[in-house]
Amino acid sequence: MKFFRTLGVLVLLLALGAGYVAYQLNRPFGVFGDETFIDFPKGTSTTQMAALLAQHGVISNAWEFLAARALRPRRALQAGEYRFAKPASVLEVYDRIARGDVFYHVLVVPEGQNMFDIAAAAEKLKLFPVADFLRAARDPSSIRDLDPAAKTLEGYLFPSSYRLDRHTTPARLCQLMTGRFREVWKTLGPAENVHQTVTLASPIEREARFPADRPLVSSVFRNRLKIGMKLDCDPTTIYAALLDGRYTGTIHQSDLASANPYNTYRHAGLPPGPIANPGKDSLLAALHPADTDYLYFVLRPDGSGAHNFSKSIAEHLIATEQFRRASRREQVEENPPGRVSQRKKPHRHN
């Protein structure tokens, strides 16, 4: 009889202990403030992980993590950096590390962004300051084998989505982006003058919203280049103002008159280098322009973002006036009499 009483007490104690452990492992915990980051290098043991998690306030005691490991011994724990932003149970923490749910930023670089845009986006993600990225992007040494004339990495910071951890340096990001450019460039066919191609593709990217317009815009630029006609391209003027540190979001007469070599309202021919980072479609358009006699283009008045193309200045002036009338109508509809207009001046067009 005494044996059974003792056995019953042991069973009860085991049940209570198991219940306590289960409670502890499923109880949300976290005393680390807004967020904390823990980096587990390759080779970190379970005991070391448990100690670090407890030290940073992610779990209350290291033994809890070891208990979770004992309950789920077949799951391999993954090295890497983890971000903890809210209280979680030990089992939830354990499962995250077993899944390899490491922390990373996604830097999305759309086609047509320049190095200033990329720098601002990286700083917004708290990766590194604008100045640090610009310093790395202004060093063309990593692309000089492909483009000996490159002044910076502008044009070769290929648009894509990049998964970056908090330890990614500006130089490493530039390496990833130029590496992606090299991959795409190899797919485009016979070797061409990469500097001229990328330089031409960059204003094509900035001017043409739709893929169908890009070969046509390319033909306009190439036709102008053939006859020595200035490109008169707004994005190049904006880039010149950016380089001079005086762009305010609007093109001024002083920008159009600027002697900066990137200002194609003052200088014939291509600018000295790319003004943005083109995608594959714009690179293809630069390599394979449409066969046209067009010398001008302007946005259509329908608001679609597509362009009207013209062979003569007379045709172009008509198309430009149609666009301006539509813009004025839209401005009146958005800002009827009595309301102060917040609309910016219409962007200049070729």
Image (cartoon, rainbow, N blue to C red):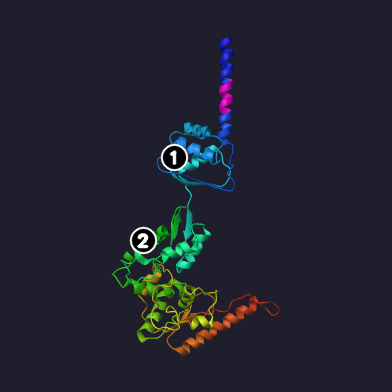
Residue 95 in percent (x, y) is at: 49, 40
| Quarter of the view holding residue 115 | bottom left
Q: In the rendered image, which residue does mark 2 sit on?
A: 179
Please tell me which residue lies in front, 141 or 274: 141
Residue 17 in percent (x, y) is at: 57, 26
Query: Which residue of the protein is positioned furthest toward the bottom in this rendering?
Result: 314
The amino acid at mark 1 is Leu
Q: Are marks 1 and 2 in contact (CB under 8 Å)?
A: no
Residue 15 magenta-highlighted? yes
Residue 13 magenta-highlighted? yes
Q: Which residues are magenta?
A: 12-19
Please report whichever mark, 1 or 2, sits nearer to the chain's N-terminal start.
1
Please rate how many residues cluster around mark 1, counting C-alpha atoms within 10 Å: few if below 14, some from 14 to 19, many from 20: many
Dot 1 lies on which element? Answer: loop
Residue 53 in percent (x, y) is at: 51, 40
| Quarter of the view holding residue 12 | top right
Q: CA distance from mark 1 to mark 2?
A: 31 Å
The amino acid at mark 2 is Gly
Q: In the rendered image, which residue does mark 1 sit on?
A: 77
